[in-house]
Amino acid sequence: MAQKNTLHTLSELTGYAVSTVSRVLTGQAKKYRISAEAESLITREAQRLNYQPNLVAQSLRTQKSQTIGLLVPGIENPFFATLSGIVIGLLRSRGYHTIMADSQESEQEEAASLRMFQGRNVDGIICIPVSQTPALHDEVSRQIPMVLIDRYFRETTLPYVCTDNFEGARCASAFLLEKGYRRILAIQGVPASMPNQERVRGFQAALASGDATGEVAGDAFSVENGYRQTLAAFQDGQRPYDAIFAFSSTILLGVIDALRTLGLRPPRDLGVISFDNNGFLDFVDPAVTRIEQPLREAGEIAVDTLFSIIDARRRGLPEPPLRQLLIPPTLVVRDSC
Amino acid sequence: MAQKNTLHTLSELTGYAVSTVSRVLTGQAKKYRISAEAESLITREAQRLNYQPNLVAQSLRTQKSQTIGLLVPGIENPFFATLSGIVIGLLRSRGYHTIMADSQESEQEEAASLRMFQGRNVDGIICIPVSQTPALHDEVSRQIPMVLIDRYFRETTLPYVCTDNFEGARCASAFLLEKGYRRILAIQGVPASMPNQERVRGFQAALASGDATGEVAGDAFSVENGYRQTLAAFQDGQRPYDAIFAFSSTILLGVIDALRTLGLRPPRDLGVISFDNNGFLDFVDPAVTRIEQPLREAGEIAVDTLFSIIDARRRGLPEPPLRQLLIPPTLVVRDSC
DNA sequence: ATTAGAAGCGCAAACGTTTGCGCAAAATTG
DNA sequence: CAATTTTGCGCAAACGTTTGCGCTTCTAAT
């Protein structure tokens, strides 16, 4: 069985008190005027034993954990996976660890995870919210700095950094109209989520100004949903739409699959446009015209914002100005419409 | 500022001792014969205050954490992201939380992460190893149950569950040969990693039996690597190979991209085959023939194995039989060769 | 009327740190 | 040489739990 080395064992081995050992190992030797002799003896012994401080005890004592909680609604979705990867990397480069939770789009799970974060003394939370009301988030964020990413609440005092989904959807829709499409089917994701609502709004705003018609269907950011909705719309050889606007790349895959089943081929038979960045979209046949979101930038801003709050609270300073940001996405034109 | 509720505050509010409160809230009321009256009062008050036990203190005291450490070599790779998602989900369904670390293919980072897991009292570790020698892993695993997934050490007493990469690569190569391809370029990932080495072996084993020739190039599981190697191989209009075997879906994307640049089109101009499962591969033009790995099954076995060890150690039982598993992958035939 | 057992609960130690305070010895000063 | 300061380090409390043990009080049995 491996050794369980504590300050106490080091104390016994070196003959110095636990407190002295602690001060040496936390680099406070100078500050507390520990002799060079003691310092080198202790560090040497710590090296030899591969001493690893018990982070749990440390955290209990200092009320910090060098850990950030990351809450996403479904890690299996490549969009969230990519975003998570970016955030985890950024946190790591700041010396912070990440504890991940997955709410699976469930408010229950979300609440449980937030509570768990509280109980774990995480130093901050980055959250893609699922719930409709910010009550719990507000409460938790009074104790632990939190910033929202990708989704946000309409009226909230929580900082957030999200894509300007309204503008993105408007822009995508306008592009379709410009290309001459007139009957557009938008296949949406989770209807209650803010990005989705904004995309619906953007879609409708673009339609409002012209003579085109549009409809919204669907209920999940999933391949299945894309498949199902497309099949349903084009059943019996009908062609009620001449373009499809998929609200995510997962939905898009379902659409493409369904179109193949139906024997329809974009852009010949109808136009297709999507949301989300995903390198794979360039390799789909045909390469998909899409709205790309600045994920890395969003991640960076979110992490920055989070740490500025953490920092301010630690030093007892007033909270930094509330940062609520909508980053404009960009249209990437390819061959699908 | 939000309330910081501890057993102590509940104790004061209800008039019962901290220990009583603790026992009630951990469901030990019967066991310790706490009166129904006390129990209901305490639970009621805990509800009202939204009491959330301090998991850090709990963990320090009980030496458990309800947390598993997950170490991957690069979360941005969709393959690892998918696998992570599966594992996180499985752990969650067992009531365990996940703390994720990313070694970025660096031994240094890997070591730091494993030490971090130790310091955090995680109850178990699931690891995709990066290091070449199992020394540290062996040491850590004496203290904390660990199972390897996806990659393993050649001679190790650590349990693992991985794809049978030799067989997968052999099978893919054999398929190419069968289709008549004779000059094959294999573009590999991280050369030192076990799956990669096994794939190289499988590739060479398949070639050995016939009259075909093959070469191995590349050094990373990345899109760039695939792109670079393909371009380098086919420069100056040369056609030294009639098929490419990409060792991962990321590499594959680079290959496809390069082929487009070069004006070559599979399967007409040459055959292409890949490793990895990734739903997107069906939507690439042309749909990619590939070796799919049973990710979910692997995740399930890994988690099962881990908990069987955790369980055995907790109850002081002997370790369960060492489980070292190679799961055979499956060939999925599409249109790229 | 004593006593044994049960019922109901509290004391205090322990988990491994960090840190304010204090104390003795050595060094410096007047 | 006495008084003061500096040097070097240890004591013990605290973070919030869990849990072995033991202390009362009550009931019931002898």
Image (spheres, coloured by chain):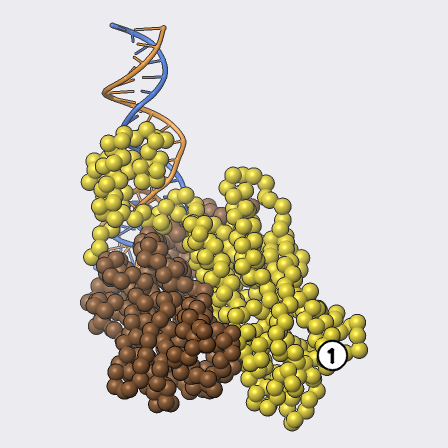
Chain colours: A yellow, B brown, C orange, D blue
Near mark 1 (Cα within 10 A), the count class, few <14, some 14-19 or many ≥20, is: some
Quarter location, residue B273: bottom left
Of residues B26 and B214, which is closer to you in this image? B214
Q: B312 above or below B284?
A: above
Quarter location, residue A246: bottom right
Quadrant into which the C terminus of chain B falls: bottom left
A178 left or right, relative to B60: right
Residue A263 location in percent, x, y? 59, 91
Residue drawn at the location 67% of the way across and 57% of the way down:
A155
Query: Residue flagged by tag 1: what amino acid is it?
Result: Gly
Residue A271 location in percent, x, y? 66, 80
A30 left or right, relative to A45: right
Of residues B28 and A164, which is closer to you in this image? A164
Q: How many marks?
A: 1
Residue B230 location in percent, x, y? 43, 73
Residue drawn at the location 28% of the way across and 83% of the way down:
B206
Q: A238 above or below B138?
A: below
Q: Chain of mark 1?
A: A
Of residues B168 and B150, which is closer to you in this image? B168
Q: A304 above or below B132?
A: above
Residue drawn at the location 41% of the way across and 43% of the way down:
A62
Secondary structure under badge 1?
loop
B20 left or right, relative to A3: right
Residue drawn at the location 31% of the way across and 84% of the way down:
B212
Residue B120 seen in the current view: yes
The residue at which mark 1 appears reads as A180
Residue at the far front in the pictured view: B236
Residue B167 seen in the current view: no
Residue B316 location in percent, x, y? 22, 63
